[in-house]
Image (cartoon, rainbow, N blue to C red):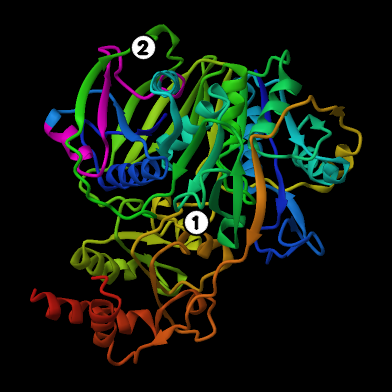
Amino acid sequence: MSVLIFVENWDGKFKKLSFELVSYGAKLAEMYATEAIALTIGNVESSELVRLGKYGAGRIIQAVNPGITSFDSQNFTSVIAGFALQENAGVVVLSNNNTGKAIAPRLSVKLKAGLGAGVSKLPATISPFVIYKKVFSGNAYANFIIKTDIKVLTLAQNSFELIENDRNAVISQVQVDWNSAGVKTKVNEVQKQDGKILLTDADVVISGGRGMKSPDNWGPILEFAELLGAATACSRPVSDEGWRPHEEHTGQTGKIIAPNLYFAIGISGATQHLAGVSSSKYIVAINTDKDAPIFSAAQYGIIGDASKVLPKLVEAVREIKGK
Amino acid sequence: MKILVCISHVPDTTTKVKFIDDFKKLDSTGIQWVINPWDELSLTRALELKDDAANGVTSVSVIHVGPAATEPTIRKALAIGADDAVRVNADPKDAYYVAAQLANAIKGDAYDLILCGIESSDYNGSTVGGMLAEFLGYPSVSSVSGVKLENGQVVVIREIDGGKEIISAETPLVAVVQKGIAREPRIAAMRGIMMARTKPLKVVEPVEVDALTELVAFEMPKPRAACKFVDPENPKQLIELLQNEAKII
């Protein structure tokens, strides 16, 4: 058997989450004393493919077909299922991002393989196969047994560290069947946000809430984010009011993120907000109300008015960074 | 065009969950049950599409897998404006089991568009919609933040990493929807509540399906260490702590 890792590429490029996935899959393969195989679909330069090998993949498969011009969940599922059977995969690992969420459930039915969605660590044991995941939006956790021979897992983003382990992976390019006529979802247009750090990819996130009082007060947040190379986010009332775009809303019904460092500025920390950010490694809160629930989720806090504290923080970072 | 909205019945999102039976079961004492927030938004969008006569939506139905005790949640969906409902009379065992029951209950009913919320706020799996599509052999689009109907085709906005795709899809289609699909969930009016009592609610018995996963036990999150407070007059100290103690920046 083997562990098959589906690694998405973005216009032929990989990113940190790709290497997290390969690191995870390689560790899982070690538990089975078997090989980790990384699979990507579409054209990727070999210099980029080689990068997957640095995180423990024994083999790298690039599935190509001139017909593959955009994502289609049915066809991607067929290609991945085909390799899972051909490589006798015991586990198929995908990211819990938008693409993984689109494919993994279909794959689970196609392979009749139990699905562990949004896992954040390796299984406690592989026989029985026990996974650990967040439930009730982070208000609890649960262990589940996956009972089928083949398992499908999706890994929560930024939950597993990169582990370098160069195995001189063998790279192969494989022509696959692609049912162009069976593509029932046609991408008419792609709108990209260029140049911005993606909220779900960011190591540091600066987030503002209603305590910022007005959309005109966002300047220091943007400046602070720029200095730290951070992405910006906001709470639900802020996006509902239209102070910030809805893509920035983090929380239960918005984006669920797990950066290394999350700044909650003028955010009280309702259960629904914490559900979206509680997996952050460190939370820093700035709030005027010392009893705000955000302080029980935070490791560091400042009780004070964001409009007074933030400029001083910006100044302190400038000083330290020598800017 | 017939639209179907899949509905999950979940504890109100502000619930402080507790467990019984050695952490094997949710303690339902005092829990307020609601329509899963994303499903409620799906239903709202489906009704908005029906409101515009140009779209030619003939009916909006809802379906739910759950025992008789969950019927108030289905009646609520009918009160909000769904035309009819189906309940599969079974305790959900896992996502695969639920998707298989849904697929069995609706096969043969010619729904053109099936809307599922991206996840339920209890198991946070993001799984049932995609599984249902695969069981039915239908195309699916996930992470959908907008849906409209244009000349018999469904046009959806799919959120991707760092952008959006505008996709036209053939029907029947399963759209797995998230934030953005509708602005505010629609609320039941008194007239709707009265009408809901007499709207059709069909009960379907489950088929035999094995769950593929099994709960071992729940756990409560580990308590976080107490927050360390920094003097608001000297926020530089915070940056130093993040650099030297947390070693994070």
Question: Where is mark 2, residue-wise?
Answer: A178
Q: Which residue is located at x 29 percent, y 12 percent?
A: A67
Horizontal side of residue A99 vs B237, given as left or right: right
Horizontal side of residue A216 vs A126, given as left or right: left
The answer, for residue B145, to whether it is visible in the render is no
Task: Inspect the magenta stretch and tell me whether residue A316 lies in it.
Answer: no
**Vertically, is B208 above or below B34?**
above
Amino acid type, callout 1: Asp
Give the image location of residue A130, x and y in percent. Answer: 56, 48
Give the image location of residue B62, x and y in percent. Answer: 73, 32
Q: Which residue is located at x 71 percent, y 61 percent?
A: B23
What secondary structure is found at the residue carrying circle 2? loop
Horizontal side of residue B175 vs A287, given as left or right: right
Alpha carbons under labels 2 and 1: distance apart: 42 Å
Looking at the image, the residue that sits furthest to the right is B198
Pointer 2 indicates a residue of which chain? Answer: A
- On-image quarter of the N terminus of chain B: top right
Is there one chain holding both mark 2 and mark 1? yes
Q: Name which of mark 2 and mark 1 comes first in the sequence.
A: 2
Amino acid type, callout 2: Trp
- On-image quarter of the C terminus of chain B: bottom left
Residue interval drawn in magenta: A47-75
Give the image location of residue A178, x and y in percent. Answer: 36, 11
Few, some or many residues within 10 Å of mark 2 (<14, 14–19, 20+)? some
User: Of residues A70 and B134, which is closer to you in this image?
Assistant: B134
What secondary structure is found at the residue carrying circle 1? helix
The answer, for residue A188, to whether it is visible in the render is yes
Residue B151 has which mark?
Answer: none
Few, some or many residues within 10 Å of mark 1 (<14, 14–19, 20+)? some
**Vertically, is B177 above or below A42?**
below
Question: Where is mark 1, residue-wise?
Answer: A240
